[in-house]
Image: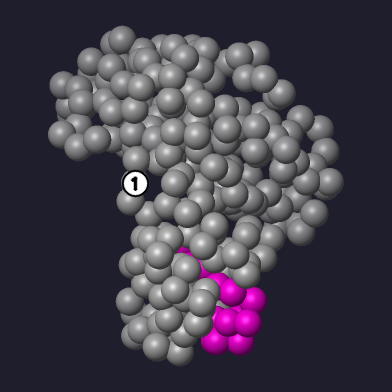
Amino acid sequence: MAKPSKKAKMIAEKLDAEKLYGVDEAIKTLKEFASAKFDETIEVAMNLGVDPRHADQMVRGMVSLPAGTGKDMRVAVFARGDNADKATAAGADKVGAEDLMEDMQAGNLNYDRVIATPDMMGIVGRLGKVLGPKGLMPNPKLGTVTPNVEQAVKDAKSGQVEYRVEKMGIIHSGIGKKSFSDADLRKNFDALVNAVIKSKPSGSKGKYVRKISVSSSMGPGLKIDLGDVEGV
């Protein structure tokens, strides 16, 4: 059995695994312990009282993080004519139609979001088995099937993220980088949590938000005191 690293020992000595942290205190503590050589992502995990195997308990949506994500989002757009020009002008990394479909079928899927105009869904539909497993399939409910591709690209580039509950009823999402100010991370935390709360499905019974924790890419997970989270 491998011995714990010096860093792991230090964290274990200084942190109480059972302590409930206020949001601001948790963010400050995580940044103190985030010692990786890269700019670690600060992440939120929310345990929800839902069973996503049932359609009326699915939680999924988009939220714009006020301080951005700190990540360069790669966006592909299926569009033609004026819409293609607008998507390109808005900063899309790749714009096309049949040519983009063939490129993706060949395995070129290095994108964080795929957007399409409604008239392109006949083409995009052929990519269901390719885009679906990666969570990239355009969806009108998420605003990724839209005639206003210009705004959709701008939203994606400026800090809009998707949240989606996983099999065990947990939502994971990054809310920024260690290099962000404490205030910006708090703004992003509040934006994400508020969006998830507003997305409470009709089939959710009992307590909806059961636990929230925050962590950094290489750091510990800290439990949040739900009493410090408005609306929970």
Instruction: Give 64 or 203, whichever is nearer the viewer.
Output: 64
Image height check: is 150 above or below 186?
A: below
Magenta residues span 113-126
Residue 157 spot, x, y in % from top left = 42, 52
| Label 1 sits on residue | 71
Image height check: is 116 above or below 101?
A: above
The colour style of the image is one colour
Which of the 4 image quadrants contains residue 103?
bottom left
The reply, left or right, for residue 121 in relation to residue 102 is: right
Judged from the image, the secondary structure of the residue bearing numbered disc 1 is loop
Q: Residue at x 44, y 33 (%)?
A: 67
Residue 8 spot, x, y in % from top left = 24, 24
Which of the 4 image quadrants contains residue 124?
bottom right
Q: Which amino acid, by three-letter code, is at mark 1? A: Lys
Q: Residue at x 63, y 45 (%)?
A: 169
- The kind of secondary structure the magenta stretch mainly shows is helix
The reply, left or right, for residue 66 in relation to residue 70 is: right
